[in-house]
Amino acid sequence: MLPPYTKPHLSFADQVALLIQRGLGVTDQAKATDHLRRIGYGRLCPYLETFQQLVPDPTDSSKTIRSPQFQAGAEFRHAVDLYLFDKQLRILFLDAIERIEVALRVDLAHTLGKRNPLAHRSVQFLDSRRATIILKHSGRPRHDVWLDKADEAIRRSQEEWVAAFFNTYSSELPIWMAVETWDFGTLSWLLEMAHPNDRSTIAKQYGLLPDTLVSWIRCLAGVRNLSAHHSRLWNTGMVNQPAVPKPFEAATLVHIGTAPVQRTRVYGAAAVASYLVKKLSARTSWSGRMRDHWIAFPRMPLANATQGGFLAGWNTLPIWT
């Protein structure tokens, strides 16, 4: 039986005192207290974890766990620097993903809509094999679960044109209207379930194989969720890792397969975003802005850009120029 949670509520000053007690360097306690008041201990914790000691797991000596104690040289200001770096990183990603998401809306609406205005609502117009997979968490077909989510987004929409449509017509929204109510995750699911010929048509616009594009969009949908919810991004593990493309697809991204950390951390997602944004606008400055942001990674002990998958020499690769 698990024990109950018994840790007491702490004032901001007491939180600073606890961090000092655990070995964290705090050069300005008043400033640290102010940061905790504005940012919150819980939001700063993922950045503080980077500096905690790793000790043997008492239940399994082959593993390690984080100790409450901090490593020598760790300072509170370093965690704040990481937080601010990560904040700007999320903003950069959201800028790129907005462009990619808008383009994907158009791609899906135009391609599937040509097949049928309500192609998204019927398995007969999609990839029946993928759409009818039974999902473990619900025990229902993937398309049924997806359609519930898609319809819920339409019902919750506050757009006047949505209300005007249903006040005028008895039918469902055609796909070229419905896409405007869906989030990136909903779009990514539909891309994965789209008819094989439609997936191929959309992927060709980016010079990619269908499954490569599906993988990349799924990866960016995960990054979008982390960014939108202000979660740690710079060195977090990627649940949906981007597929390594074949050389004939995207030669500038084949290198993400040379070291696992480039895909398990945020570097792979950044490289994928750079590729797709360049496909949408050859003159984009986004790649350069992402490159400059990582080159300016804050100097500190115990944390560096390689923890995000940005290995030595990354900034000289063609994808960033």
Image: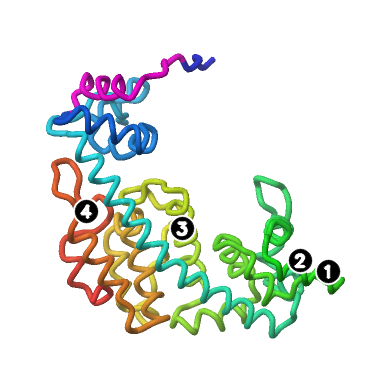
Question: Which residue is labeled 1 in the image?
Answer: 167
The residues colored magenta run 6-24
Q: Which mark is residue 163?
A: 2
Q: Amino acid at mark 2?
A: Ala
Above or below — where is 293 with respect to 165? above
**Marks 1 and 4, how far apart in space?**
55 Å
Query: Is residue 260 shown left or right of residue 7?
Result: left
> Real-space Cα distance between discs 2 and 3?
28 Å
Q: Amino acid at mark 1?
A: Asn
| 230 relative position to 24: left or right | right
Residue 206: quarter of image: bottom left
Which callout, 1 or 4, points at the residue further toward the start of the chain? 1
Q: Amino acid at mark 4?
A: Thr
Q: What crowding class fits label 3: few (fewer than 14 Cα within 10 Å), some (14-19), or many (20 or more)?
A: many
Give the mark nearer the N terminus: 2 vs 3.
2
Labelled disc at residue 224 = 3
Q: Considering only order in the chain, which callout, 3 or 4, is on the residue closer to the N terminus?
A: 3
Residue 123 part of the magenta segment: no
SS of the residue under disc 3 = helix
Instruction: Identify the image quadrant of the C terminus.
Output: bottom left
Q: Which of the labelled discs sits on residue 306, or is there none? A: 4
Residue at image coords 54%, 74%:
104
Where residue 230 appears, as percent x and y from the top left, is 42, 48
